[in-house]
Amino acid sequence: MSAQAPLRRINVPQIAARKGAEPIVALTASHVQFAQILDAHCDVLLVGDSLGMVTHGFDNTLPVSVELMIAHGAAVVRGTQRALVVVDMPFGSYEESPQVAFRNAARIMAETGASAVKLEGGARMAETIGFLTARGIPVMAHIGLTPQSSNTMGGFKTQGRNADSWPLHHADAAAVAEAGAFSVVLEGMVEPLAAEVTAACPIPTIGIGASRTCDGQILVMEDMLGLGDWAPKFVRKFADLRTEVDRAVGAYAEAVRDRSFPGEDEIYT
C-alpha cells in the first residue's frame, strides 16, 4: 500500500486567481492548536498583529515587534499543511524605506516559512510593495481602515461615509494592485464603496467589516469564536467559547476541590 500523498499548500497564484470566483475563506491565527483546526477550512491564515491585543493584552497593535510576529508565524506554519500563511508586518518595520521593509520581510519569510507578508497602506506604500514583489516577496495589501494608523485617523472609524473620500480609496486599491500585491484587505468600508472597489480592482479583495461584496472575508478568530468580552459590531459570533471555557474551568475547579479528580481511570498505572 502506498503512503498517502501529503497535502499541497495553497499558493499565492491560486489565491490571486480567485478574483471574481469562489470566495476566499480567511481567518487570523496565532496558536498552533487552533491553526491545526482552521487549516482544513481556510484558504488563508493571517498571523495578524491583532495578536498583540487578543493574545498579549496590549491596548493596540503598536507595541507588536517583528520578533513576536516571527514566533507566532512559525507556530502557525508548523500547525498547518494546506492554508496559505500570511504574516503581518508590524508597525515600524516597513514604513522607513523599501530597503528596511525588505530586510524585515525577508527575515519574517525565512524564519517562519510563511508564503507572504501583509502591510498596511495604499498609494503611499506602492513603492515598497513594488520593491518587495520584485525581489520575490509576495505582498497582501491592506487599505481602508488601517489599525496601525488609527492615531492619525482619529480612531477606528468606518471609511467611506463621505463620498468625497471614495476616489482616494479607489486610487489606493489601484496603486497596490499595479505595484504587484496579489490581494488586498478592505477594512471598515461602507458597502457601496467596497462593492465599487471590488468591481474595479483586478486583484481579490478580502473584506473585514466591508460587506459581502468582497472576493473573500476575514475575521479575527477570537472575535468569531466569542472568546473575548468585546468584538466589533460587524462581527458575527459563530460560537460562544468564552462561556464554554468558563463552564469547563469551573467544572474542573469544582472536581479538584471535592477530590473527585483524578478518578481511577485518569491516572497512570
Image (spheres, rainbow, N blue to C red):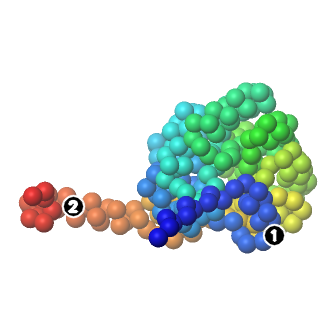
Q: Quadrant of residue 90?
A: top right
Number of marks present in the image shown: 2
Residue at 28% across / 64% down in the picture? 248
Residue at 60% across / 56% down in the picture? 45
- 4 sits left or right of 147 in the view: left
Q: Amino acid at mark 1?
A: Gly
N-term mark: 1 or 2: 1
- Looking at this view, is 263 or 149 the one in front? 263
Q: Residues within 10 Å of mark 1 (few under 14, many from 20)?
A: some
- Looking at this view, is 44 or 198 the one in front? 44
Return the x and y of residue 106 as percentages of the image width and height.
Answer: 68, 34
- 174 sits left or right of 26 in the view: right
Identify the disc placed on residue 136.
none
For the question of whether residue 266 can be seen, the reply is yes
Q: Which residue is mark 2?
A: 252
Return the x and y of residue 193 as percentages of the image width and height.
Answer: 83, 63
Return the x and y of residue 246 as percentages of the image width and height.
Answer: 32, 62
Residue at 87% across / 59% down in the picture? 202
Residue at 73% across / 38% down in the picture? 152
- Looking at this view, is 71 or 78 the one in front? 78
Circle 1 sits in a helix, a strand or a loop, which is it?
loop
Q: Amino acid at mark 2?
A: Tyr
Label 1, label 2: how far apart the Cα atoms are = 48 Å
Which of labels 1 and 2 is toward the front?
Answer: 1
From this view, report whether residue 124 is shown above or below residue 84.
above
